[in-house]
């Protein structure tokens, strides 16, 4: 016999990790999709829906399972090890990113709980007042939306779906859409597109190294910067700022988790015993 909590942990790693692996192949989406920040943000998290429903079913099973649960077969213990490794890798990378420090960015937003704007003295010396104000407006938009925290969470989600390249593609699409959205927000606040474009070019020239995933920087890779510059030099479409998320999108997810928990409470014991018997 084994403690219920240990059995639950093994099943969570095995079944939850398996659900993530199956859902992680979901394609990153077409390149044009990265124009919408809210859509690309949801695409990062949608592959987690099957895993959340699986965890809901396991939670329902645990409510009725006695303290001393049946022993997990060795085959299932071995099968859970790769998923445990992936979870530990994601946790290690998340902690390491919190400790990472990079002073080479020209302008950036840092801080998970209390984000703040940091500007290098080097970029202050080379920018005129209007261009510097444009850079600050862009970074303050990152502060308002707590984007360093969102970047950190999105990186964790991507690491949990390792090694699927589609997960990395979804993260990249969202990061690019995020910069588009913050550019638009700054322009809607009165910043001139050419001034912000000049700030981005200057930041790219002065930034010496890539920033950690917890930092929202003004610069980016050169190919994407060219696309941003072209966009900033065009007239801004008359549209309201994009909403970060729509509450109604959570309703089917919450409903699905609730139904999964109910199913786990009702049928979980039979399903788990059948699984153990099949591989014993």
Image (cartoon, helix red, strand yellow):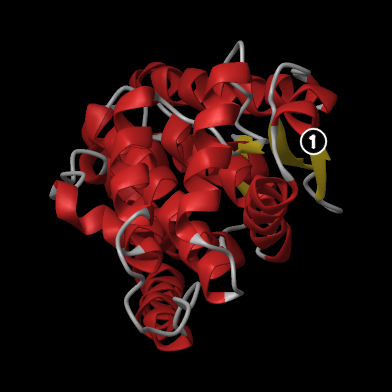
Compared with residue 167, is residue 53 higher up or lower down, i.e. above or below?
A: below
Q: Is residue 277 visible?
A: yes
Residue ID for mark 1 = 119
Compared with residue 197, is residue 191 higher up or lower down, i.e. above or below?
A: below
Q: Residue furthest front?
A: 128
Q: Residue at x 38, y 41 (%)?
A: 171
Residue 197 position, x and y percent, is 47, 45
Rendered-image quadrant of the N terminus = top right
Q: Residue at x 81, y 38 (%)?
A: 118
Q: Residue furthest top?
A: 208
Compared with residue 197, is residue 55 higher up or lower down, i.e. above or below?
A: below
Q: Is residue 128 left or right of residue 159?
A: right
Closest to the observer: 61 or 39? 39
Number of disc labels: 1
- Image-quadrant location for residue 216: top right
Q: Is residue 276 visible?
A: no
Say few, some or many: other residues with alpha carbon within 10 Å of mark 1 (under 14 / 14 to 19 / 20 or more). some
Residue 233 position, x and y percent, is 34, 54
Closest to the observer: 106 or 72? 106
Element type at mark 1: strand
Q: Is residue 88 left or right of residue 36?
A: right
- Image-quadrant location for residue 105: top right
Closest to the observer: 110 or 220? 220
Compared with residue 37, is residue 188 higher up or lower down, i.e. above or below?
A: below
Residue 86 position, x and y percent, is 47, 23
Q: Residue at x 40, y 83 (%)?
A: 255
Q: Is residue 103 left or right of residue 259?
A: right
Q: Residue at x 78, y 22 (%)?
A: 122
Residue 234 position, x and y percent, is 30, 61
Rendered-image quadrant of the C terminus = top left
């Amino acid at each position: 016999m084994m403690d219920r909590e240990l059995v639950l942990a093994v099943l969570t790693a095995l079944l939850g990790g398996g659900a993530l692996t199956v859902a992680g192949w979901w394609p990153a989406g077409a390149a044009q999709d990265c124009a919408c920040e809210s859509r690309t943000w949801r695409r990062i998290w949608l592959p987690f829906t099957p895993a959340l429903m699986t965890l809901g079913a396991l939670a329902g099973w645990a409510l009725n399972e006695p303290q001393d649960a049946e022993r997990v077969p060795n085959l299932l213990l071995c099968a859970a090890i790769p998923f445990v490794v992936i979870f530990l890798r994601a946790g290690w990378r998340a902690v390491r990113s919190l400790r990472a420090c990079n002073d080479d960015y020209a302008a950036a937003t840092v801080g998970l709980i209390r984000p703040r704007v940091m500007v290098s003295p080097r970029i202050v010396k080379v920018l005129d007042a209007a261009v510097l104000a444009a850079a600050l407006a862009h970074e303050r938009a990152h502060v308002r939306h707590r984007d360093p925290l969102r970047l950190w969470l999105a990186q964790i989600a991507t690491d949990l779906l390792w090694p699927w390249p589609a997960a990395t593609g979804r993260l990249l699409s969202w990061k690019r859409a995020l910069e588009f959205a913050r550019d638009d927000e700054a322009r809607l606040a009165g910043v001139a597109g050419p001034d912000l474009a000049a700030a981005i070019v200057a930041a790219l020239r002065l930034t010496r190294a890539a920033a950690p995933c917890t930092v929202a920087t003004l610069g980016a890779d050169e190919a994407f910067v060219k696309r941003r510059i072209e966009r900033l030099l065009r007239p801004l479409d008359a549209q309201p700022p994009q909403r970060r998320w729509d509450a109604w999108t959570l309703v089917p997810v919450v409903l699905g988790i609730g139904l999964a928990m109910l199913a786990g409470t009702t049928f979980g014991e039979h399903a788990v015993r059948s699984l153990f018997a099949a591989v014993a």
